[in-house]
Image: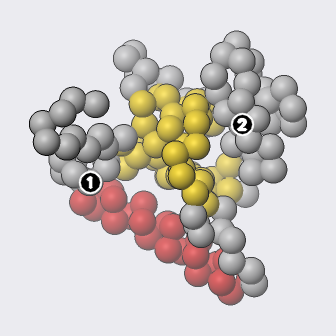
Amino acid sequence: MPQCLNPECLTINPDNFQFCQKCGNKLLLVERYWAKSILGLGGFGRTFLAVDEFKPSQPFCVIKQFLPQAQGTATVAKTAELFAQEAERLELLGKHSQIPELFAYFSVDSRQYLVQELVVLLRNGEDT
């Protein structure tokens, strides 16, 4: 069930919907990613568990939505710069078993997004 990415809405919608039934926001991000649920939130924004529609196996991935809590033009500009630097650093690091691979970095509706690999941590040999 896709979750709306509109920060003022966040409604969970039925699977067959293309637009949020509450606010009308498009649910398929850049015609590729479906947000499924919120994984976390912090001072920079929200993190969503998502599905990549472009791959045949439709694997899970992570969407980070830049949504700063800070106020003031200079502060927001600096945090936006830091968010962009995170994308650049992930791309430079490339593939590593404990660092998520960067899949995409883009802006939609004046919001920045970073899409990365979902890294699942195993404890004591347990499968998750």
Which label belongs to residue 59?
A: none
Instruction: Say which of 16 and 114 sits in front.
Output: 16
Which label belongs to residue 4?
A: 2
Instruction: Say which of 65 and 105 sits in front.
Output: 65
Instruction: Tell me: 19 left or right of 51.
Output: right
Which label belongs to residue 99?
A: 1
Q: Is residue 63 visible?
A: no
Q: Is residue 81 visible?
A: yes
Q: Which amino acid type is shown beneath numbered disc 2?
A: Cys
Instruction: Tell me: 93 left or right of 9.
Output: left
Cα distance in 3D space between marks 2 and 1? 27 Å
Judge whether 55 appears above or below 40 on screen.
Answer: above
For the C terminus, the quadrant is top left
Identity of the residue drawn at 50% across and 74% down: 82
- Residue 115: x %, y % from top left: 47, 46
- SS at mark 1 in the image: loop
- SS at mark 2 in the image: loop
For the N terminus, the quadrant is top right
Q: Which amino acid type is shown beneath numbered disc 1?
A: Ile
Identity of the residue drawn at 21% across and 29% down: 127
Instruction: Tell me: 54 left or right of 91.
Output: right
- Residue 83: x %, y % from top left: 51, 67
Instruction: Say which of 46 and 114 sits in front.
Output: 46
Judge whether 76 appears above or below 117 on screen.
Answer: below
Identity of the residue drawn at 65% across and 27% down: 2
Identity of the residue drawn at 36% across and 42% down: 117
Most extreme residue toward the right, as rendered?
A: 23
